[in-house]
Amino acid sequence: MRLTRAAVSASADHRRSERSHGGAQPPDRPGRPAEGSTAGQSAREPHTAAGHAHGDPAERAPAEGRHDRAHDGPRQEPGADDTRGDRAPAAPPRPEAPFAEVTESAERAASVDADVAGAVLRTARTVLRAHLAEAAAIDAVFARDVARRVADFTLGGGKRARPRFLWWAMRACGGGEDAVDAALRLGVALELIQTCALVHDDVMDGSALRRGRPAVHVELAGLTGGPPDTAFGTSAAVLVGDLALAWADDTVSAVPLDPAPRNRILAIWRAMRTEMVAGQYLDLHGQAAATRTAAHALRTACLKSALYSVERPLALGAALAGADDRTTAALRAAGRSAGTAFQLRDDLLGAFGDPAVTGKPSGGDLRDGKPTYLVAVARERAEAAGDTALLAVLDAGVGNPALTDEGLARVREALTLGGARAAVEHRADRLAAQAEAHLDHAGLAPAGARQLRLLLREAAGGRTSPPPASASGHAPGTAPEGGTTR
């Protein structure tokens, strides 16, 4: 895989310019497009306290991508006469040696290796700055209330797990020097589609919290100045998610690639978007139709989380590096196993998690009646054992939005005593082991494979600690330690 020669040359020019100027310049605010932008000028609007109490990550970032030719000194046209009296004509500038550019690119790839999340964050600030300038040129209120929230949400949290999977898959498959910019920008696109997924997920679930803060639809409900307007907040949050998805697609389409890798990457991207929506729909349908089978829950987990969170990012990295079919298939299998384990652990946290750890309400998945694998296994085990008392507890508690803390404790105890919690832990452990076994057969570069192994372990998680014993020998209300959250 090769980036276009023009893209590599432009990237090198930009980096040389930044070094000669002592670094990049501070960004412009969304109401004032960056220098050189064709978006036009727009009136600068103050940010609302409700929308920006957490600050403006994009504004604090150093600007990237700005190249002021005025500081490069006068340029002489090729062939111009530069004689001064008897002095010999000035020698033409020597072209930069090819190995110098290669060395610089290799150094940049190594720099990203040291901090993938930080490199993606810096690239995201550059990408989002351009999008915010375009939004501000359209309308200042839209830019402040909607576009700015996309940027703040994208920059303001998360582990950058999907871009890290993409990067290390690319490196493990032998890619690097000529794929740095493409990998980072595709990583930003993954972060933007994650913003879309989480904002919409919170709307559909009615979740009040995300990452320990008010969810976007809750925050937007307070913008009107009077009592919280839930309908407005919900509708506006849908638009926030829509814009994030549009920006994600725009970011992918703008990555300069040769035709072969571009076609592979676009095919993966299209499949991932559709799979993500299908998984979310199965989740909704399972709640509405009270679908309770473990098979349905696993299918939903695969589509909603495993493919989108791990398998497809790995496939994107492999495509960037031009990996062969055998290597790509092994990576995808590893990603699917680890991603499914991730979702099973997330189900456990949804039932037993501490809001201080998960950033979501305690027991929210149980009150919402989510058709998780955990609850499906609990029902199937109780039915097989003829345990009508346990089934009665599940029927009364799961899907009951008015479930009290005492009722929640009883449901948790049923999940534990009936063996469902341990069974899900065991299934997640087996999937994590399978992920590592698939990775062993991928034929990867050692350094990249080592990093991928660590990432897969992080995603699949480790066993959660058993709940400490109470007077009855169980403490179903405690939160598990470890695990992962989205």
Image (cartoon, rainbow, N blue to C red):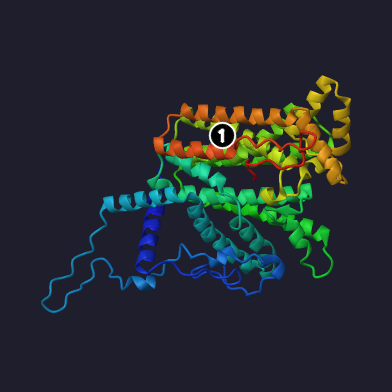
Using residue 388 as the reference point, say whether residue 322 is left or right of it. Answer: left
Write the residue at 50% across / 58% down: 122
Write the residue at 18% across / 69% down: 90
Q: Position of residue 234 (x, y in %)?
A: 78, 56
**Hey, which residue is sitting farthest bottom in the picture?**
85
Taking the image as drawn, is residue 319 in sight? Answer: no
- Quick one: 280 or 211, which is closer to the camera? 211
- Quick one: 320 or 109, which is closer to the camera? 109
Query: Eyeballing the image, is 445 above or below 159?
Result: above
Query: For the image shown, how many numbered marks are present on the structure?
Result: 1
Using residue 182 as the reference point, say whether residue 56 is left or right of it. Answer: right
**Hey, which residue is sitting farthest left in the picture?**
86
Taking the image as drawn, is residue 30 in sight? Answer: yes
Question: What secondary structure is marked by label 1?
Answer: helix
**Amino acid type of the residue tagged 1 in the rendering:** Gly
Using residue 2 as the reference point, say whether residue 193 is left or right of it. Answer: right
Q: Position of residue 312 (x, y in %)?
A: 57, 38
Q: Position of residue 419 (x, y in %)?
A: 74, 27
Res 342 → quadrant? top right
- In the picture of the structure, the residue carrying the numbered disc 1 is 335
